[in-house]
Image (tube, helix red, strand yellow):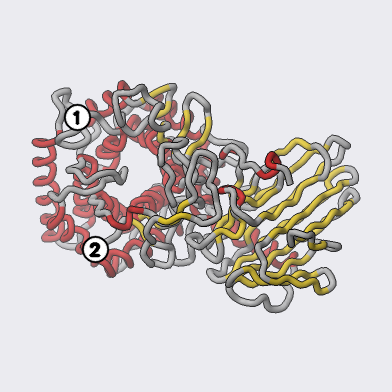
Amino acid sequence: MSRAATAPYALREYALIADGERGALIGPRGDISWLCLPRWHDDPVFGGLLGGPGRYTVAPTGRYVWGGSYEPDSLVWGSRWVVDDGSIVECREALALPADPRNAVLLRQVRAVAGTARVEITLDLPAEQQHDDVGTWTGRSGRLHWRWTGARGARAGRDGALSAEMTLDEGDVVDLVLEIGLDEPGRPRDPDRLWSATTTGWADGVPDLQVGSASRDARHAYAVLRGLTSGSGGMVAAATTGLPERAKRHRSYDYRYVWIRDQCYAGLAAAAHGPLPALHDAVRFTTARLLEDGDRLQPAYRVDGGPVPDVHDLDGMPGYPGGVAIAGNHVNTQFQLDTLGELLQLLAAAARLDCLDADGWLAAQVAVDVIEKRWDVPDAGIWEVEDDWWTQSRLAVIAGLRRIAEVAPTPGDAGKAVTLADGILAETGRRCLSPGGWWQRSPGITGVDASLLLAPVRGALPPTDPRSLATLAAVRDQLTQDGYVYRFRPDPAPLGEQEGAFLLCGFVLALAEQAAGNEVAAYRAFERTRAACGTPGLLAEEWDVRQRQLRGNLPQAFVHALLLECAAHLR
């Protein structure tokens, strides 16, 4: 296969299918370019996204134009190709539900919609052994067992890859089922039953959110969060690793883990719509981590609750162009104070919806005690940089303390939280207020930070407080470009040279504008930010304003979470 045929695409062209335990990216040539098994944090079986081995492709043999869409309120993807001979081919794709943490089932259903379709199918698994039993291929790839059915006539080439060419008359359907995991496959699975269970799982898993013009995007955002959330309740920050934020700037990270902050954002977004399952998942996972680890709470975990590994290279993969193929994350050595504030906000939101149990209240008390001990200690902050006395971290815990005080079970608990919040706010105001009246990033860093807009949104202080209004004005003046929002100025260079606009911050600006009573500006920021996507409607962490390209890992959970929250408030 030529280099052009194996080169990765711009991020806006990838679709995601996911079942909560793992996720796959599909490109416009019908190639599954990324899938880690058996779970998110494991090594990739299909690694073409980062130049690694393994591929699974279904596509027409002729010249074609690609398109596609998700089935409503799901991550069931449909690729569609219009071929130059007049035929139209579609491929329906999903990871089967209900999900098994040990084993995955990958469904691909090929259909000739118009004309006679000629389709090429390739499955290339790095296999130690593989065997054909009358059209059913079985094999081993490392510790994984697999079975592939449906590709009648498939043959192994010299490189071991299995391939088949099929001719489908108009209306013909072929079901391809790839079962792969830690256990040997049992009895063959019926494709119709697998599809029925999968569509039912999505219908039951995504609520019918009705929020005006943003209803479809809100349900899609919820589906993305659902697809990224394991049966443990843990939601990975993104499905991928190593997708660069900026080429050759050593800005490649592994986000296939559960960030406590991101999980809280997702829970708060769900709570804005009501007591949805995503709220319960967030409370369940974060409460367990806080009760287990206490003041040793980590910023991130694996979906099984285990520790995030140290950073290391993914062997045999050159990486996405401009990036580095890595696994693990340096966050495992950090303390992030703001995470405790986000946890209290989440628990308070659950309490207001009457869905916080005794363990949740105990976790809230633990969080308050840890804040009391550590609020004055430098931390890595929301952006996970060098330790400092970050203003946003203090404002986040102030907001969390005020929110939990509103629902505290006893006057004593409420009084303790309010007193602590008042003391932290007084000290933060003394250290971190700029001469211009806005919140600056830290006592020694005078610039403004877009994350500071969350303070009035979350309740650290009123939206009409002069410091809130001055911060909003400073972000508008210093950190926006063409309607998009940067998180801060990393140096005196023009915006966009060091990093892209942060899509999370665009949605935060929308919430801050609305809190300040600026409805038109709020809608403008919301609409501008949610438009930064490709055909599949997925959003990454950053947006290159000049090139109009997504940057960073895909899809980024907290961006979709803030979209979901905005949709609840900007009806």
Image height check: is 473 above or below 344? above
- Residue 74 visible from this viewpoint: no
> What percent of the width, then of the height, locates residue 520?
40, 24
Mark positioned earlier in the residue sequence (1 or 2): 2
Drawn side of residue 258 relative to residue 429, left or right: right
* Total marks placed: 2
Say which of 416 and 67 sits in front. 67
- Residue position marked by numbered label 1 in the rendering: 446
Drawn side of residue 227 relative to residue 1, left or right: left
Image height check: is 202 above or below 535? below
Say which of 42 and 238 sits in front. 42
Drawn side of residue 338 relative to residue 122, left or right: left
Quadrant holding the C terminus: top left
> What percent of the width, then of the height, locates residue 267?
39, 53
The circle on residue 296 is 2
Task: Tell me the kind of residue under disc 2.
Answer: Arg
Task: Tell me the kind of residue under disc 1.
Answer: Thr
Q: Residue at x 37, y 31 (%)?
A: 486
Distance between mark 1 and mark 2 Cα atoms: 31 Å
Q: Residues within 10 Å of mark 2 (few under 14, many from 20)?
A: few
Q: Residue at x 53, y 69 (%)?
A: 101
> What percent of the width, then of the height, locates residue 567?
45, 40
Disc 1 secondary structure class: loop
Occupied quadrant, residue 96:
bottom right
Q: Residue at x 36, y 64 (%)?
A: 307
